[in-house]
Amino acid sequence: EALHRKGEEYRLFWPEQSEFVRMASRFGATIIPFGVVGEDDICDMLLDYNDLMKLPFYDILDKKLNEEGLKLRTDSTGEIKNQDMHPVVLTPKMPGRFYFIFGEPIETKGREKELRDKEKAQHLYLHVKSEVESCIKYLKEKREEDPYRSILPRLLYQAAHGSDAEIPTFEP
């Protein structure tokens, strides 16, 4: 989820299967949806995979990297199995603020039998996915209202209130 191509900022890539929900229910685990905003804003992507593939001979280098590189999730199917490594060219931005929020816990304890049913597990999976997307949407809205989003206002606040002063944030 950390490195996207151009235009994919804050896009989540979810596996097609709801296996993590079924695994959570097997162990009675609590699923806690959460969102993070800020990681897609720490750098500008100058060249992504699509740009690099347009460079002469880059396709040969890319093929070699992926033939000899570490393979992950080789027993998976669909999009999740497509784990080729593709370097990117980035430039850093001025550091912004990171925003985190945790959603309401979703209990699976006592639902082991119910969630063995793939349809019911898929329904809960879609609920978790929706909750995560809502968390991110909420944080993006709050970020736009944050007067301390950029580093300069945060530095000025600390200069005026002391270096150990806690910079104000929003109340969820």
Image: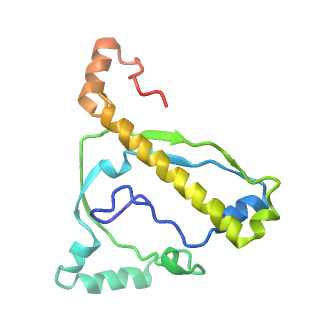
Name the side, left or right, on which 109 lies relative to 31: right
Residue extending farthest left: 56
Say which residue appears at 40% left-offset and 45% top-offset. 37
Above/below status of 113 relative to 77: above
Percent x, y of residue 90: 25, 58
Q: Between residues 91 and 112, which one lies in front from this camera angle?
A: 112
In the picture, residue 161 is in which quadrant? top left
In the picture, residue 121 is in which quadrant? bottom right
Say which residue appears at 34% left-offset and 52% top-offset. 40
Q: Between residues 41 and 85, which one lies in front from this camera angle?
A: 41
Say which residue appears at 30% left-offset and 48% top-offset. 41
Q: Between residues 151 and 128, which one lies in front from this camera angle?
A: 128
Name the side, left or right, on which 142 lies relative to 93: right
Q: Between residues 43 and 70, which one lies in front from this camera angle?
A: 43
Numbered-mark total: 0
Q: Colour scheme of this structure image?
A: rainbow
Residue extending farthest top: 161
Above/below status of 38 relative to 10: above
Percent x, y of residue 137: 42, 47
In the picture, residue 108 is in which quadrant? bottom right
- Quadrant into which the N terminus falls: bottom left
Can the viewer see residue 158 in this picture?
Answer: yes
Can the viewer see residue 97 in this picture?
Answer: no
Percent x, y of residue 168: 39, 22
Say which residue appears at 37% left-offset and 49% top-offset. 39
Percent x, y of residue 21: 67, 62
